[in-house]
Amino acid sequence: VPFIAVSAFAAWFGMNDIAAMKASFSDQAVIFQRKHNWIMCWLYTGTFGSFIGYSAGFPLLAKTQFPQVDSLKFVFLGPLTGWLSDRYGGGRVTFWVFILMIAAVGGVLYFLGIKDQPDAFWGFFAMFMILFFATGVGNASTFQMIPAIMRQEISRLEQGMNPAEQIRQAGM
């Protein structure tokens, strides 16, 4: 709580440049016409949204489907894998992350189907760890694609702008 209070105080008094940034809705609505905006929204929802959903669903599913296992000792591990995502990035990584996510969901469904077998929980657990890892890496890789896309889009959309202004507009 003290860190939140200090951050809120610093934001309130230190972020005074935001008030000068005003734009009408029509000025901002240009993003709805940009293909890359929509693609990145879907990719980000697929990674970060899945990470959040798995963080909520994994403990509940583990508890209801494997009542014989005290899974609360293990389910906290899933969300901890997100820190690994900062080491990877780019379009190829995002593609392979989605392939890995599809395979891991298939694995989760398989192990739920054989949940009464010995050690089925550990297969289920391993598949969820793969899902958490993949969504964490995918979250970072989608973020790392944004500057490259913006660099290309700003130069295409704002052709008369000088290079320094293009960098400022791209937010880099």
Image: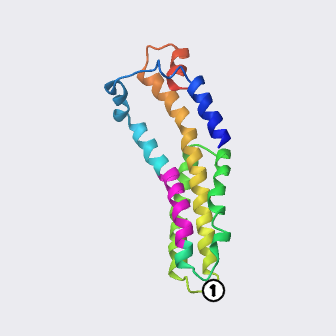
- Residue 68: x, y in percent? 61, 83
Q: Main secondary structure of the magenta part?
A: helix
Q: Position of residue 58 (x, y in %)?
A: 55, 66
Q: Quadrant of the C terminus?
A: top right
Question: What residue is drawn where x is 57% and y is 81%?
Answer: 67
Classify 10 Å Cα crowding around label 1: few (below 14), some (14-19), many (20 and above): few
**Residue 50 inside the magenta-drawn segment:** yes
The residue range painted magenta reads 46-61
The answer to whether residue 7 is above or below residue 134 is above
Residue 100 location, quadrant: bottom right
- Percent of width and height locating residue 56: 53, 61
Q: Residue at x 66, y 56 (%)?
A: 80
| Residue pictured at 61% horizontal, 30% vertical | 9
Residue 106 placement, left or right of 157: right
Three-letter amino acid code at the position of disc 1: Pro
**Residue highlighted by disc 1:** 118
The quadrant of the picture occupied by the N terminus is top right
Does residue 62 show up magenta in the picture? no
Residue 172 visible somewhere in the drawing: no
Vertical relation: 31 (above or below) 132: above
Q: Quadrant of residue 6?
A: top right
Is 6 located above or below residue 15 in the figure? below
Which structural element holds mark 1?
Answer: loop
Would residue 105 be visible to someone looking at this image? yes
Q: Position of residue 148 (x, y in %)?
A: 54, 33
Q: In which image quadrant can residue 124 be found? A: bottom right
